[in-house]
Amino acid sequence: MFLFKRDKFFSLKDMNILSVENLTKTYRSGNRELTVLDKVNFEVEQGKTLSIVGPSGSGKTTLLGLCAGLDVASSGSVRMDGKPLENMNEDQRAGIRNQLVGFIFQNFQLLQTLTALENVMVPLELKKRKDAKEKAKELLEKVGLGDRLTHYPNQLSGGEQQRVSIARAFANEPKILFADEPTGNLDTETGEMVENLIFNLNEEQGTTLILVTHDLELAARTHHSLHIKGGKIQEAING
Ligand code: ADP
């Protein structure tokens, strides 16, 4: 059940993987305060996909970072899997991220001194998995990079680097995957491949997907869309 009312999605509370309430973020510059997000409200059910769209500077990346527990709000609440992030310290937020979250960024954010295989092994080793190497290899094969295991990021194309970052995000077996302009730096064909990998994860494993995008065709593939402008939700669309 997923109901839409004004700028809120309402759904059965215990089914929500993410609940955002009155989320506000202000930055101080000199003696001026800049409100980048202004009392944002929405909820996402486990297994659904949500896109966040809006003009540059509207607060999309800030919103994604707060939802993922990478940053803390000035006021308001983010509950992930029922747990309020604002009550946690940095270590506790890192813990919940390791446990539940995968990330894909526009600029890939791979560790440059590690090979493709070693990059994907990082989250597996954090979870102390004995089969880290085999599992990482399997994931890279899944994204079509079985022949690039020992390549360093600077020896890979943009599309290949993004597929390594997807394999790394999948390694976490996330309940929720955050993606910030995942196809933004890729040509159309590679972008489509990356897009399909992400949506397959949602379809095959029920991973919740929250993605920021400029691409309205990509946004149209998600169950729900939030249109944000000047830090406020302008429109929420159920697909
Ligand atoms: P979008 O992702 O929609 O392009 P952002 O969330 O990146 O927007 O940024 C929203 C606004 O917040 C912009 O005006 C940006 O300049 C400002 N902003 C982002 N991060 C900071 C920061 N650390 N300090 C001050 N202002 C910031």
Image (cartoon, rainbow, N blue to C red):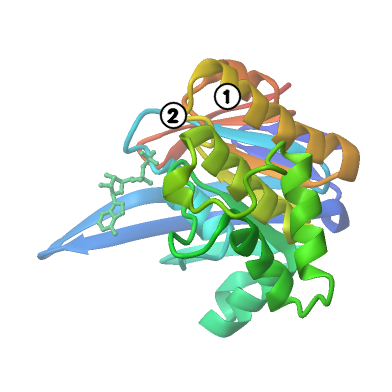
Sort mark 2 into few (<14), some (14-19) or many (20+) by Cα contacts within 10 Å. many
Compared with 179, 4 (above or below) is above
Q: Amino acid at mark 2?
A: Gly
Mark carried by residue 163: none
Q: Nearer the viewer, residue 112 or 40?
A: 112
| Circle 2/circle 1 CB separation < 8 Å | no
Report the residue that reaches farthest toward the left.
30
Mark carried by residue 54: 2
Percent of width and height locating residue 55: 37, 28
Whether residue 187 is visible to the viewer of this picture, yes or no, is yes
Sort mark 1 into few (<14), some (14-19) or many (20+) by Cα contacts within 10 Å. some
Percent of width and height locating residue 71: 46, 65
Q: Which residue is mark 1?
A: 190
The residue carrying mark 2 has its beta carbon less than 8 Å from ligand 1: yes
Q: Quadrant of the C terminus?
A: top right
Percent of width and height locating residue 114: 51, 64
Q: Nearer the viewer, residue 219 or 25?
A: 219
Q: Amino acid at mark 1?
A: Thr
Q: Quadrant of the N terminus?
A: top right
Q: How many marks?
A: 2
Q: Is residue 235 left or right of residue 154?
A: right
Task: Examine the image and state in which quarter residue 206 appears.
Answer: top right
Residue drawn at (43%, 59%) of the image: 112
Q: Is residue 146 left or right of residue 119?
A: right
Residue drawn at (72%, 44%) of the image: 146
Residue drawn at (64%, 42%) of the image: 210
